[in-house]
């Protein structure tokens, strides 16, 4: 796992037009500059937004990576939900703490916890 | 001069980027609340506006993440996001390097703040400015609290940062306005995007309006994450603004949950009595 490296590449793509241009022109060379696993490279190249989310990429980075690939907002959300079905809970990073329950299940759990207190 | 304005507002990118997907009446009410806040800020004749934001990996990353930062430049480019995504035209917003430097030197007396001579605005600053100062005619001093990449600064340190900004603003001859920008409960850019814990938001705003320091600082990050999502970490910007109000009480001018914008859209000010 090298979540830091995946996120760093996406961070550079989001903020630096020259990195974006290089990524368009010579993607493999850019990918080679980061310490990435084959799974991570596959997810970036496809791009597999659902798997990137499960790998732990922060949504504040990932949503712009999706926009870069012309993925519309509702589709972006759906791809993450599908990724959780396909690949299981988030493995690392800020979202790994609770996993994904879905809005209704989460609301119900918080309500039950409040009633217990 | 004593601080002339102190407030807080949402910065959700959906408010510009997906504006038409909200109910028309809600959208109009939100935009008019922003116009009123902009008018209120201008009425205090500020020389500069300090914006305490919670930027989202536009400038700061986990290779060298400052808990607190203040910009020190004569101009700032933004928004960094795709113009079509955010629907805000990229431009250079005026800053004031000399003023920033004096504020930073004062803040540093009590808070180890990083300074940045380069700073690209993201939606955390660009969205509020789009509504509040659409002509970009007021110099901005950007400030940031790391609310995105844990470990995050403890809430008590966010409070100390707000206190330091107030002391620094009061010490310069310029008339300084200040706003914090951030969301309350939200799960932005995740599969849960659109979820809002309204009860939690209202309780937070009650504490904020009362400027109840102890109650504001009593949240733990684990509790905030569970109840308010990772977006809830951005309460640090509201807390810093409360500290800058130096005990004044607040008024919530607008607060309505808008799931397509992923937050309770909120605008509020502290009655600092200038």
Image (cartoon, coloured by chain):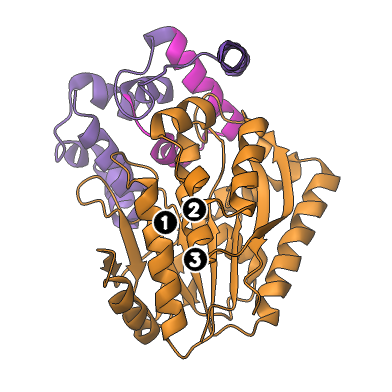
Chain colours: A purple, B orange
State the separation of the CA atoms marked 2 and 3. 9 Å
State the separation of the CA atoms marked 2 and 1. 6 Å
User: Where is mark 1, residue-wise?
Assistant: B159
Q: The residue tagged with tag 2: helix, strand or loop? A: helix
Structural crowding at the residue carrying mark 2, measured as other residues with C-alpha within 10 Å and reported as few (<14), some (14–19) or many (≥20): many
Please name the residue shown 33% across and 26% down the image. Answer: A56
User: Where is mark 2, residue-wise?
Assistant: B239
Q: Position of residue B236 (x, y in %)?
A: 45, 49
Q: Is residue A81 magenta?
A: yes
Name of the residue lying farthest toward the right? B25
Chain letter belonging to callout 2: B
User: Where is mark 3, residue-wise?
Assistant: B244
Kindly tell me whether residue B10 is visible in this rendering.
Answer: no
Left/right of residue B55 with respect to residue B153 in the rendered view: right
Please name the residue shown 41% across and 39% down the image. Answer: A65
State the image quarter where residue B204 is shown: top right
Magenta stretch bounds: A56-85
Chain letter belonging to callout 1: B
For the residues beneath circles 1 and 3, the answer to whether they share a chain is: yes
Question: Which badge, 1 or 3, is on the more N-terminal residue?
Answer: 1
For the residues beneath circles 2 and 3, the answer to whether they share a chain is: yes
């Amino acid at each position: 796992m090298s979540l830091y490296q995946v996120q760093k590449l996406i961070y550079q793509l989001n903020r630096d037009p020259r990195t974006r241009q290089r990524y368009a022109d010579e993607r493999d060379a850019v990918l080679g500059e980061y310490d990435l696993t084959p799974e991570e490279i596959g997810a970036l190249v496809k791009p597999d937004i659902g798997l990137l989310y499960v790998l732990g990429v922060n949504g504040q980075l990932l949503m712009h990576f999706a926009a870069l690939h012309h993925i519309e907002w509702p589709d972006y959300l759906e791809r993450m939900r599908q990724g959780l079905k396909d690949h299981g809970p988030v493995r690392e990073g800020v979202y790994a703490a609770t996993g994904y329950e879905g809005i209704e299940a989460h609301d119900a759990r918080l309500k039950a916890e409040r009633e217990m207190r | 001069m004593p601080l002339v304005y102190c407030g807080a507002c949402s910065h959700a990118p959906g408010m510009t980027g997906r504006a038409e997907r909200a109910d028309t009446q809600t959208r109009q009410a939100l935009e008019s609340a922003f116009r009123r806040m902009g008018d209120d800020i201008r009425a205090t004749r500020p020389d500069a506006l300090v914006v305490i934001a919670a930027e989202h990996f536009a400038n700061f990353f986990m290779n060298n993440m400052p808990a607190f930062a203040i910009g020190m430049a004569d101009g700032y480019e933004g928004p960094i996001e795709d113009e079509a995504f955010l629907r805000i035209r990229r431009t250079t917003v005026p800053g004031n390097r000399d003023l920033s430097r004096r504020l930073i030197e004062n803040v540093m007396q009590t808070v180890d703040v990083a300074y940045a001579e380069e700073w690209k605005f993201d939606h955390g600053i660009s969205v509020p400015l789009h509504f509040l100062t659409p002509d970009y005619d007021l110099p901005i001093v950007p400030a940031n609290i790391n609310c995105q990449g844990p470990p995050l600064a403890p809430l008590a340190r966010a409070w100390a940062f707000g206190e330091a900004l107030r002391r620094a603003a009061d010490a310069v001859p310029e008339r300084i306005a200040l706003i914090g920008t951030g969301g309350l409960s939200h799960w932005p850019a995740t599969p849960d995007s659109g979820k809002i814990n309204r009860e939690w938001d209202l309780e937070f705003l009650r504490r904020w309006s009362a400027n109840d320091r102890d109650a504001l600082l009593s949240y733990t990050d684990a509790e905030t994450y569970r109840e308010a999502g990772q977006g809830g970490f951005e309460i640090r910007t509201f807390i810093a603004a409360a500290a800058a109000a130096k005990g004044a009480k607040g008024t919530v001018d607008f607060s309505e949950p808008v799931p397509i914008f992923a937050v309770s859209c909120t605008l509020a000010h502290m009655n600092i009595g200038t």
